[in-house]
Image (cartoon, rainbow, N blue to C red):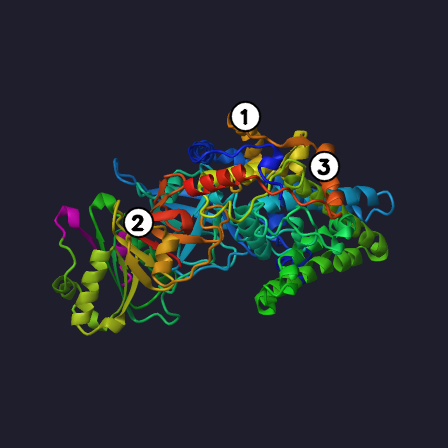
């Protein structure tokens, strides 16, 4: 396991964790008190632009040949905005305080295969509560890849890079099917009955999405059917590749720690913040880049405060970083190319049966025990 | 609009607009375009009562979208408006106009209660203000065949649905008798005073009795009703007002054995809230418990309920439920909130005194 020690970070004492948590709580409370018109205007502006791109994209397919590339570009942007800055964030409940049913986590659904209801459980609850706890957080390798040395090597994992490539290409399908927990099903820890409702929801959503993108809109362009069909395939592909890459940079670059279930038993809120911080990584970039990544380029801030509007993450990033420095904790950030390189390195490295991590020394184990007991 | 409306409501268009719905696109072009939802613009605002130091009463005229299916007098509508701070809040208001057909203008009449953030906002609103609506709701209405004799007993703001019905009776040239008994604090608090005066003068079989309790008028009693209308037992009655009046009238009809003549509309009283103790009501399941200070989620589970939950620490929103009334404290932020019909995360909310939650 990439323990905290393996990432070069230090353990905090119980008192330190409490103070660390209190500082994070203070940021949260300040931002919550500030929420208002600006945040509302921002997300409504993003929605307006996304719908413009979408309508423009659909319309440009009527323009033979010269319209095709702009159409694909507009539709790709629309889908990326819809999934990242709007869908992911709205479904986190970041805008529930507005009371607007159109921007409410319980009502919103996004332009992708995964039905909102399934995704919210797997993501908001399983992933965000148990972030990077090996054996609990199903987003570690998504039940497909080997992304942590704690996952025992099998010859199957030789295909790690191939599986990653396929997952990237068919990412929206992967996200939708993720909630079926097929690996758990195979292992006998999950029953078919548990999956019936989840599966039915996926099937309903998939029918709607495929009918819209691959039948209805192409058919509406008449003789241009094949071009529109191909354009929609490419737009979905562009979105898949982009979202896969942003998301993989959130938890898998070097320096990100994972945790054992024992470490997190009866966890304090301070340790929860500590785990979120060390289990996430940021990507640097321009304002436009942050918007297109749904501000998941601020994965650290997102994991510390998953229900704060994402446009606030860049605003509090400096403060979070300063707190990290004071506690001697790494603030994992870097350019997209650096983080991607690091992630793909990991995907390839874990394809092979590398050494298991050395057993933590007696002293470290004792230290861990102390923290747990104190907590 | 009907052809366009039919088209916009078609399954084909729904499939194209999936998963967001066609209204999400139409509203961006023009907020008054809609295929399913109902919205309206304020076109006129008139002050009915303006007593210094007292809450204003205003009548607001709205132009709804073509999706408005019309209303029957006596019905109400759920109205949502974005308050300053970008928070949308929903309240029920009685429709005060005589009735409306699909897409037609209607009015609501409201009192700007000091603690009613929506009514206060609307009483000061400018023409052009956009609001979000439900369709008209409620069965406190006149039957299709109006009885020969109709009695209205109302108190305070409860006059509004009765006024809407009275107006429709005037328009319909109802040939029977109408007795209109209303209780207000003073002449200055009397809503619709001029209009009621005109109706009284016109003398088309409408007896208007306005009782001003602040100016020596006697509160409702069976004896008083007997004096005004000896045959009230045999008259179909519509009753709307504050709890005290409603209970007194109900008792009078019960004693007279005439309960089946009475139709009642409650104005739900606000619940009291304290800092400790109190009752926690789970509306949907009809269970209630003594508030022991734990989170609402824990108390619901202790009461044998199984609300949906996720992280139990306020981050995943799986447990979000609607708080109907009462005050809750967010244990993450320490903030308290007393808004009606508010979405709360029950895993991080504790009740402060009486509270009811839709679980």
Marks 2 and 1: same chain?
A: no
Q: Nearer the viewer, mark 2 or mark 3?
A: 3
Helix, strand or loop status at disc 1: helix
Residue B214 lies in the magenta-colored region: yes
Tell me how many marks there are.
3
Q: How far is the residue under mark 3 from the one under mark 1?
A: 23 Å
Q: Circle 1 is placed at which residue position?
A: A325
Question: Does the image show residue A284?
Answer: no
Picture quadrant where residue A183 is located:
bottom right
Label 1 lies in what chain?
Answer: A
Q: Nearer the viewer, mark 2 or mark 1?
A: 1
Q: Which residues are magenta?
A: B195-217
Q: Circle 2 is placed at which residue position?
A: B293
Relative vertical location of residue A282 with respect to residue B140 in this rendering, above or below: above
Relative vertical location of residue B25 with respect to residue A281 in this rendering, above or below: below
Residue A308 versus residue A275: which sits nearer the camera?
A: A275
Mark positioned earlier in the residue sequence (3 or 1): 1
Relative vertical location of residue A147 with respect to residue A270 in this rendering, above or below: below
Asked if labels 3 and 2 touch by Cβ distance under 8 angstroms, the answer is: no
Q: Circle 3 is placed at which residue position?
A: A342
Which percent across, then down, holds residue A335?
70, 31
Side (left or right) of A94 relative to B195:
right
Q: Quadrant of the N terminus of chain A?
A: top right
Label 3 lies in what chain?
Answer: A
Label 2 lies in what chain?
Answer: B
Label 1 Cα crowd, 10 Å radius (few <14 / some 14-19 / many 20+): few
Residue B355 versus residue B139: which sits nearer the camera?
A: B355
Helix, strand or loop status at disc 2: loop
Label 3 Cα crowd, 10 Å radius (few <14 / some 14-19 / many 20+): some
Q: How far is the residue under mark 2 from the one under mark 3?
A: 49 Å
Side (left or right) of B160 relative to B2:
left
């Amino acid at each position: 396991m990439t323990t905290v020690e393996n990432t070069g970070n230090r353990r905090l004492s119980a008192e330190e964790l409490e103070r660390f948590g209190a500082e994070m709580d203070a940021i949260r409370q300040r931002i919550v008190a500030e929420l208002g018109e600006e945040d509302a205007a921002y997300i409504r502006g993003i929605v307006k632009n996304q719908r413009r791109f979408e309508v423009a994209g659909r319309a440009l397919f009527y323009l033979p040949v010269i319209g095709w590339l702009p159409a694909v570009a507009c539709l790709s942007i629309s889908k990326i905005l819809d999934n990242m800055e709007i869908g992911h964030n709205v479904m986190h409940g970041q805008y529930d305080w507005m009371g607007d049913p159109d921007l409410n986590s319980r009502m919103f659904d996004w332009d992708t295969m995964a039905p909102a209801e399934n995704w919210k459980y797997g993501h908001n609850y399983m992933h965000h509560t148990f972030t990077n706890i090996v054996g609990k957080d199903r987003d570690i390798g998504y039940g497909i890849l080997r992304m942590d040395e704690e996952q025992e090597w099998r010859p199957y994992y030789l295909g790690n890079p191939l599986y990653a490539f396929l997952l990237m290409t068919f990412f929206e399908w992967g996200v939708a099917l993720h909630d079926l927990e097929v690996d758990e099903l195979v292992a006998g820890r999950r029953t078919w009955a548990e999956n019936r409702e989840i599966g039915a929801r996926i099937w309903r959503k998939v029918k709607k999405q495929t009918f819209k993108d691959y039948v209805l809109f192409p058919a509406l362009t008449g003789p241009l059917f094949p071009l529109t069909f191909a354009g929609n395939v490419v737009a979905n592909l562009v979105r898949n590749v982009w979202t896969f890459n942003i998301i993989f940079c959130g938890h898998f670059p070097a320096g990100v720690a994972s945790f054992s279930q024992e470490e997190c038993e009866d966890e304090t809120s301070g340790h929860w913040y500590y785990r979120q911080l060390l289990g996430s990584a940021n990507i640097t970039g321009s304002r436009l880049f942050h918007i297109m990544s749904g501000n998941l380029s601020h994965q650290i801030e997102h994991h510390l405060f998953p229900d704060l509007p994402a446009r606030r993450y860049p605003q509090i990033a400096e403060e979070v970083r300063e707190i990290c420095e004071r506690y001697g904790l790494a603030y994992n950030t870097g350019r997209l190319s650096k983080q991607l390189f690091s992630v793909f390195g990991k995907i390839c490295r874990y394809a092979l049966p590398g050494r298991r991590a050395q057993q933590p020394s007696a002293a470290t184990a004792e230290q861990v025990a102390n923290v747990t007991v104190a907590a | 609009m009907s052809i366009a409306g039919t088209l916009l409501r078609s399954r084909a268009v729904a499939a194209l607009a999936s998963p967001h719905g066609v209204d999400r696109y139409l509203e961006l072009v023009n907020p008054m375009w809609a295929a399913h939802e109902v919205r309206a613009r304020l076109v006129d605002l008139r002050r009915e009562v303006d007593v210094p130091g007292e809450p204003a009463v205003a009548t607001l005229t709205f132009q709804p979208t073509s999706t408005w299916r019309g209303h029957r007098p006596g019905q109400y509508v759920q109205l949502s408006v974005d308050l300053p701070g970008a928070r949308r809040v929903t309240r029920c208001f009685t429709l005060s106009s005589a009735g409306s057909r699909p897409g037609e203008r209607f009015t609501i009449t409201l009192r700007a209660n000091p603690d009613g953030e929506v009514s206060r906002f609307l009483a000061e609103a400018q023409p052009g203000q956009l609001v979000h609506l439900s369709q008209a709701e409620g069965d406190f209405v006149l039957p299709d065949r109006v009885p020969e004799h109709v009695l209205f007993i109302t108190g305070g703001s409860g006059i509004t649905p009765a006024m809407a019905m009275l107006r429709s009776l005037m328009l319909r040239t109802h040939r029977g008798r109408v007795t209109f008994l209303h209780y207000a604090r003073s002449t200055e608090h009397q809503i619709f005073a001029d209009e009621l005066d005109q109706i009284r003068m016109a003398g088309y079989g409408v007896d208007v009795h306005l009782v001003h309790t602040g100016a020596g008028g006697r509160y409702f009693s069976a004896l008083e009703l007997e004096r005004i209308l000896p045959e009230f037992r045999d008259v179909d009655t519509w009753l709307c007002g504050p709890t005290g009046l409603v209970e007194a009238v109900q008792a009078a009809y019960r004693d007279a054995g005439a309960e089946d003549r009475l139709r009642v509309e409650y104005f739900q009283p606000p619940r009291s809230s304290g800092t400790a103790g109190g009752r926690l009501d789970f509306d949907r399941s009809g269970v209630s418990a003594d508030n022991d200070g734990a989170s609402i989620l824990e108390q619901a589970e202790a009461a044998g309920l199984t609300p949906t939950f996720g992280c139990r620490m306020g981050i995943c929103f799986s447990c979000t439920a609607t708080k109907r009334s009462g005050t809750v404290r967010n244990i993450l932020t320490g903030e308290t909130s007393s808004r009606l019909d508010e979405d709360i995360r029950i895993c991080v909310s504790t009740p402060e005194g009486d509270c009811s939650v839709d679980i």
